[in-house]
Amino acid sequence: MYLLNTTAIRTTRGLELYLDLVKNISIKELCIPTVNNPFYEVKFEVNYFLLEQNKYYDQQKNYFWLVMNKNLNLITLRETEMKSLFAIKNEVERKATKQLLGDWFISTNAYKKAIFQYIEVDIQKNIQVENNECTKKALKFLEKLLELETTDIKKALVEKPVYS
């Protein structure tokens, strides 16, 4: 019998249940450093179930940014402006969410598959990888994401979005 790699976080809203399924994790956006923004950024979509007391479950879809500096050695987790994975959570719940990302998320098959799928799509769009500096940088960043460890995430700051 195949058992899913699953974890849960108790919040004031209910129990958030995260399943290691490929359809539950995807990359929605990827940015490489530019003059105006000197960071590598990837926006992840995470689907999970919210089990509320006296109710059935409800599927949720939220996001967060994983940001790295140009040298790919400093990680920051950034909330999205809308539908943030960290939103409407108290400090204990935010800490548990960060721990979830470090202990569970980056070790899941779904996380790895999301990165590999993005690499395949990116390579398909840019056939001449050797000649495309942007594609090279994006691939280097994605490969670095596959090497992340729990301690990398646990040391990361969690930033709230900057509203303009």
Image (tube, rainbow, N blue to C red):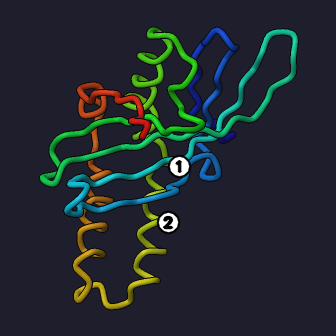
Name the element at disc 1. helix
State the residue at coordinates (50%, 14%).
93
Q: Residues within 10 Å of mark 2 (few under 14, many from 20)?
A: some
Quadrant location of the N terminus in the rendered image: top right
Name the element at disc 2. helix
State the residue at coordinates (58%, 19%).
88
State the residue at coordinates (41%, 25%).
98
* 154 is higher (above) or lower (below) than 38: above
Which residue is disc 2 drawn over?
117
Spot occupied by residue 32 in the image (x, y as percentages of width and height):
29, 62
**Image quarter of residue 83:** top right
Lateral position of residue 42 relative to residue 141, left or right? right
- Residue lying farthest to the left in this orientation: 71
Q: Residues within 10 Å of mark 1 (few under 14, many from 20)?
A: many
The mark that comes first in sequence, 2 or 1, is 1
Amino acid type, residue under disc 1 in the picture = Ala
- Of residues 7 and 139, the one nearer the viewer is 139
Spot occupied by residue 56 in the image (x, y as percentages of width and height):
86, 22
- Of residues 111 and 60, the one nearer the viewer is 60
State the residue at coordinates (64%, 23%).
16
Cα distance, mark 2 to mark 1?
10 Å
Which residue is disc 1 drawn over?
110
Q: Is there CB contact under 8 Å for labels 2 and 1?
A: no
